[in-house]
Image (cartoon, rainbow, N blue to C red):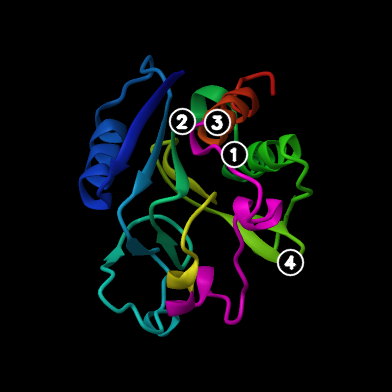
């Protein structure tokens, strides 16, 4: 598995690169995880409803091919795109979603934060507030898109949407859960996320 650290990038070219990678890969292509942050953008999934975008302001809304509704990406949020051959690994889509949630839960446990997944509303939560969102596209048994973990970011843009299609859903971030007086090393958090993703995506996991 290749782990790539792409820095702060715009969404649109990254989206096109994911699609191109997935279309070109073969049975022997290594899986990859792309760790990055995005410039501010709302992304709306295939089943997304326009009414869940309340006030986008000057933030672009991009319609994409993953599952789920609308979410926000911006600086201070780690995004991990999981380019994974489910068929080769013998993993179902549900298995993959649960493994991605487990990776985030394990990252947060490292920091002393108790988190959990919700099978009825996928993602990772802390005391009822969403801290990580998931959304995948699977094409010919291979996934792209992935997850986003709110680390140390401006959460205000989430007020412009019903996050993941849920009116009144509160969101939170790692820095808020740890307390504003405690520094969060973003690079360390990103590396922890890559480590735990690699662990849960091993064939024997």
Mark drawn on residue 96? 1
Q: Which of the two marks, 1 or 4, is nearer to us in this view?
A: 4
Q: Nearer the viewer, residue 200 or 141?
A: 200
Q: Is residue 123 visible?
A: no
> Distance of mark 1 from mark 4, alpha carbons?
23 Å
Q: Is residue 178 magenta?
A: yes
The residue beneath circle 3 is: 188
Q: Is residue 79 magenta?
A: no
Q: x and y percent of residue 95 in the render? A: 64, 39
The residue beneath circle 4 is: 128
Residues at discs 1 and 3 in contact (Cβ within 8 Å): no
> Distance of mark 4 from mark 3, alpha carbons?
25 Å
Q: x and y percent of residue 139 in the render? A: 38, 41
Residues at discs 2 and 1 in contact (Cβ within 8 Å): yes
Q: Which residues are magenta?
A: 159-187
62 relative to 45 in the view: left or right: left
Residues at discs 4 and 3 in contact (Cβ within 8 Å): no
Label 4 neighbourhood size at 10 Å, few (<14), some (14-19), many (20+)? some
Q: Which of the two marks, 4 or 2, is nearer to us in this view?
A: 4
> Distance of mark 4 from mark 2, alpha carbons?
29 Å
Instruction: Give the mark, 1 or 4, whose residue is nearer the N terminus.
Output: 1
Label 1 neighbourhood size at 10 Å, few (<14), some (14-19), many (20+)? some
Label 3, secondary structure: give it.
Answer: helix
166 relative to 43 in the view: left or right: right
> Distance of mark 2 from mark 1, alpha carbons?
9 Å
């Amino acid at each position: 598995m290749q782990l790539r650290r792409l820095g702060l990038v715009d969404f649109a070219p990254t989206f096109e690169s994911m699609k191109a990678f997935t279309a070109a890969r073969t049975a022997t292509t290594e899986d990859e995880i792309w760790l990055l942050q995005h410039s501010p953008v709302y992304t709306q999934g295939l089943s997304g409803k326009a009414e869940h975008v309340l006030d986008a302001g000057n933030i672009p809304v991009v319609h994409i091919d993953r599952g789920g509704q609308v979410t926000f990406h911006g600086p201070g949020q780690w995004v991990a795109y999981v380019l994974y051959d489910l068929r080769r690994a013998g993993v179902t889509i549900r298995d993959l979603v649960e493994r991605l949630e487990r990776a985030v839960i394990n990252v947060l446990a490292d920091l002393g934060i108790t988190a959990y997944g919700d099978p009825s509303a996928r993602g990772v939560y802390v005391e009822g507030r969403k801290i990580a969102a998931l959304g995948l596209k699977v094409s010919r048994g291979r996934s792209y898109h992935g997850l986003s973990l709110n680390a140390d970011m401006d959460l205000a843009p989430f007020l412009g949407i019903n996050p993941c299609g849920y009116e009144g859903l509160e969101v939170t971030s790692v820095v808020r859960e740890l307390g504003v007086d405690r520094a969060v090393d973003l690079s360390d958090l990103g590396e922890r996320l890559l480590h735990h993703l690699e662990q849960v995506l091993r064939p024997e996991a």
